[in-house]
Amino acid sequence: MKGEYYSVKNFEKYQHYKDRNPPWIKLYNSLLGDYAFCALKDASKMHLIAIWLLASRNSNRVPADAAWIGKQISATEKVDLNCLVSGGFLEHYNADSVLLAECKQNAMPEKRERRAEKETEGADVGFAEFWDAWPGGGRKVNKGNCLAHWRAKKLAERREQIAAAVGAWKASRDWTKDDGQYIPMPLTWLRQERWENPPAPAHGTSTDPDMFAPFRRHMTPDQLRDALKEDE
């Protein structure tokens, strides 16, 4: 680890200031639309921003020591540098400016690469169909976060149940009335596991049996109305 360090990827592109030790850094709101950033755990998001601050003090060369970094940024949870490297936010170098992460990636056995690809593909199974089936409109948003949740919760294993539930909800009263304004955002629906809940009946159906159907066949409307009054 001696002589190794981390650098923030593309740091100069976004922190293009003349003073190399500024009291601040630039943080762009486009970060909220970055899928890799949104996929990080909340703790890692805050660690990353703090590491950017630390990098601004050290000419973008942060010692490769997770414990030291944790103390410098006052982290209360363990700093996971590997996830920040794999997410494309940090690059790992040795003292001779050799990119270590890239070397390690190239050294990965081919079988391991294929296995990792298959695992990723397997985690995505059924998501494209789910997203395409979801009703359109202004509430059909956060596709990237939906996919991350789909993978994290292994919803590919429940894709058939989810697909059937989406079809039933699309025909329900709640989703078809008032121009679909009661259709939730797909991420909310997935997080709350609403595929487990039975939807309201479709338009034109009723959950209550018609108890007066037998009488209607033998009574006029006036007779039926008088009978109901007597019952009251």
Image (spheres, rainbow, N blue to C red):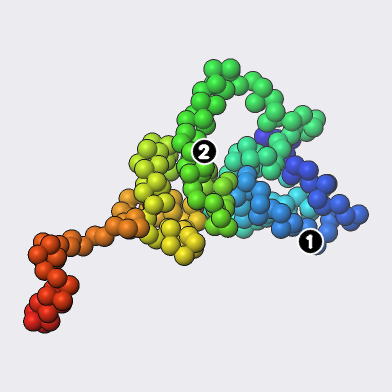
Residue extending farthest right? 18
- Tell me which amino acid carries mark 2: Ala
Judge by depth and name the residue closer to the eye, 143 or 164.
Answer: 164
Residue, disc 1: 24
Q: Residue furthest top?
A: 110
Q: CB atoms at circles 2 and 1 under 8 Å apart?
A: no
Of residues 38 and 56, the one nearer the viewer is 38
Expressed as whole percent of the image width and height from the top left, the position of residue 166 reads 41, 47
Which residue is found at the position 24% from the left and 60% from the top?
A: 207
Looking at the picture, tell me which residue is in the foreground, 104 or 147.
147
* Residue 197 in the image: above or below residue 111: below
Callout 2 environment at 10 Å: few (<14), some (14 to 19), or many (20+)? few
Q: Quadrant of the N terminus?
A: top right
Closer-to-camera residue (125/204): 204
x, y percent for residue 136: 54, 51
Residue 142 seen: yes
The image position of residue 156, as x and y in percent, is 42, 37
Q: Is residue 13 left or right of residue 76?
A: right
Position of residue 148 relative to residue 119, above or below, is: below
Label drawn at residue 128: 2
User: What percent of the width, then of the height, locates residue 23?
Assistant: 80, 62
Residue 65 figure quarter: top right
For the residue marked with disc 1, what is the amino acid? Trp
Which corner quadrant holds the C terminus? bottom left
Task: Name the residue at 43% across, 62% down.
Answer: 177
